[in-house]
Image (cartoon, helix red, strand yellow):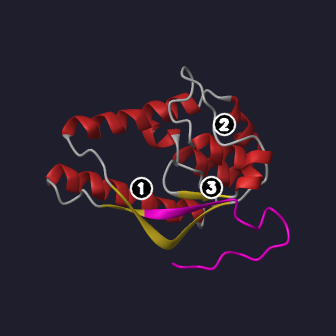
Amino acid sequence: FAQPLPKGSGNRELPTIVGFREHIFTGSVSSLANYMALQELSFVTLAQRVLDRPLRIRQHYGHPDLFDKVFIMTEGGMSKASKNVNLSEDVFAGYNCTIRGGNVVFREYMTVGKGRDVGMQQIYKFEAKLSQGAAEQSLTRDVNRLCARLDFFRLMSFFYGGVGHYVS
């Protein structure tokens, strides 16, 4: 899975956001912590691989990603900061990047360690944050603009990789 980065001539071929896999090192604390670590493994590694290839619809989800600073700063900035609208504000960096012709990829060059709160209430709050953020994202102009630019197959992949996960 350790593929080299493409050597392209245009911005569409060169990656503007590169995602990396995570290792939740607090997974051995308890059975709930193990559940949370396995859940993160399934989304952060397995789902990200599929969203990158073959679906080509991976966005930035707040995981350890490396950004092309010049592209991001000249094409709309990092995220949308609004206390009322955007609960999951970091995902908008990926939306802006895709709308403006950037390329978001997932590579497994390195694994980044991460600790999580692993109590039952923290797991519940994390899941609630993800689902509420997906609902709020469906109301934004950025998602409307992104969906207007995607072909049919990427649009369906975007739906089932986001709010469609909670609807269906």
Would you say residue 26 sits in the magenta stretch?
Answer: no
Residue 88 in sight here: yes
Report the disc number at residue 143: 2
Q: Secondary structure at mark 3?
A: loop
- The quarter of the rendered structure image containing the C terminus is top left
Is the C-beta separation of discs 3 and 2 under 8 Å? no
Q: Is residue 151 visible?
A: no
Magenta extent: 1-21
Left or right: residue 157 versus residue 46 is right
Q: CA distance from mark 3 to mark 2?
A: 13 Å
x, y percentage for residue 55? 61, 61
Going 56% across and 41% down the picture, which residue do you hit?
90
Pick the front one: 135 or 20: 20
Q: Which residue is mark 3?
A: 57
Q: Position of residue 153 (x, y in %)?
A: 66, 54
The image quadrant that residue 75 belongs to is top right
- Secondary structure of the residue carrying tag 1 is helix
Assess disc 3: are there few (<14), some (14-19) or many (≥20) residues with their C-alpha within 10 Å of its C-alpha.
many
What residue is shown with label 1? 43
Q: Residue at x 50, y 48 (%)?
A: 62
Extreme residue in the left direction: 30
